[in-house]
Image (cartoon, rainbow, N blue to C red):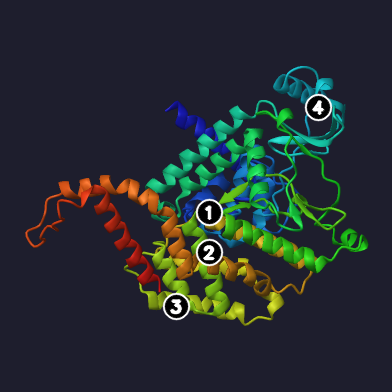
Amino acid sequence: MIRTLRFLLQLFGLAARMRRYGAIRSLTHIEMVPRWAPTTLRILTFYIPRKVSLPDDDGERLAAALAGMGPAYIKLGQTLATRPDVIGHKLAKGLTALQDRLPPFSGALAIDIIETELGGTLADHFSSFETDAIAAASIAQVHKAVTTDGQAVAVKVRRPGIEGRFKKDIALFDWLATLAETHVPTAKRLRLRSVVDKLRETVSQEMDMRIEGAAATELSQNMKGESGYRVPVIDWARTGSMVLTLEWVDGIRLADSEKLQAAGHDLEYLGERVVQVFLKQAVRDGYFHADLHQGNLIVEEDGTIVAIDFGIMGRLSKKERRFLAEILYGFIMRDYRRVAEVHFDAGYVPREQSVEEFSVALRAIADPILDLPVEEISAGALLAQLFATTERFKMQTQPQLLLLQRTMVMAEGMALHLNPKTNMWQTSRPVLEGWIRDNLSPEARLADFIVSLPRLLERLPTTLERLSEEKKTPEVEPIVIEKGTGTLGVLIIFALGIVLGTYLTAL
């Protein structure tokens, strides 16, 4: 009872904030919100004055309201910006303007945290340290420093005392999501609790600076040898749960196209590299930089793009990568039947739905987009339309694919900012064709099977034992194996049969 009252008080505080910023009307865009809810909130908060100057866009009003509610609400807004299926495309677009910026805490406090976390004094680790933060966000702020061995570095220090507030706010979000999934059928299909789970995962990762460092290291290893792109080196000796130290990067932010052009950089090349690098991360590696706004990419003097800030990362399984590559390539080739079949093969659309009707629906959304001039075609917009259409065919929401779609929109936006005539299909096609050739051809599938064969053989005795314990039906006659064959011989014969069957199927 006390817990419920505490949640209701938190909700009232949120409603009051939304009233002040004229954001209550934004709830009318969310299908699952009962019609009576916005009116009720207006009545309960009627005495709270509204700000005089407010943006016209409802999504931007909601973003302004959330920005003042604290770190958890900023992260919630950023997460909801990736879920237009939950809040509608208009609100999702408005929330993309939500900036994760907060006033910095004192440099003296940052030094205390560094000394507590790393041990010793600041001088034991850094020969110089700028006490004024160069950037401050909801979870951490960044200081420029030089290590005792002369390396210029960026030192990211976590805000003190934010864990408790995050836990309290996320508990409220989880309570609301559970309530909605219990009483609103649409909410259950949209998996609202998965939104909160993703938020909790993102926040817990960003809370521990070592996890962000590990994310940067994994991305760096995946992209090793990739020309024109790199990740800063992590200084693990000066990194802990509350402090992350990494190589300082000098250059021009990708957002500043005028400075890039004045410095002699090829803007068309940079735009293409952003898109292709993102697709390689997503499709080839299954691990991508998901906070891909222009402020997080810096261009060095030689034209190399350097990524920074690895708090939000996306991960895709092999199944999800195949799904992504095949649907994008299917759209490029306008093979809508194949795009529809991929949804069914992946198990995302229930079997009782019609493949034919789904392929017609895909054509209806894709042809108007693909018939536009090449520079106006957006793969991100196409995926957004696709995910909206799949709702009619009872497709369960896949949050990781929605995060990818949002990141793809960011990558496209940067490419078009640098070169408005960027041909997204032409830029994407080599990456997609290469991955499909290397992973989905008959030869590639056979190679994958051969690699997994030892693991299959290892599990085979257990599988056969389990099958032998099941009750045999009268219609099935047991297979008799000669006594001299032996267990190993049985396994080899069985495995060779599987290999041959797989190879013939693949041809």
Q: Earlier along the polypeptide chain: callout 2 or callout 1?
A: 1
Disc assigned to residue 329: none
Q: Is residue 123 among the parts visible in the rendering? A: yes
Front: mark 4 or 1: 1
Considering every residue shown, the one lying at the far front of the view is 484
Disc assigned to residue 324: 2
Residue 159: image quadrant is top right
Give the residue at mark 4: 106
Front: mark 4 or 3: 3
CA separation in Å, label 3 and label 2: 15 Å
Residue 33 position in % (x across, y down):
49, 53
Q: Earlier along the polypeptide chain: callout 4 or callout 1?
A: 4
CA separation in Å, label 4 and label 3: 59 Å
Amino acid under disc 3: Arg
Amino acid under disc 2: Leu
Q: Secondary structure at mark 4?
A: loop
Residue positioned 27% across, 58% down in the render: 493
CA separation in Å, label 1 and label 3: 24 Å
Q: Secondary structure at mark 2?
A: helix
Q: Earlier along the polypeptide chain: callout 2 or callout 4?
A: 4
Residue positioned 70% across, 46% down in the render: 50
Q: Is residue 92 among the parts visible in the rendering? A: no
Considering every residue shown, the one lying at the far top of the view is 120
344 in relation to 21, above or below: below
Quadrant in which the N terminus is drawn = top left
Amino acid under disc 4: Ser
Residue 415 position in % (x across, y down):
74, 65
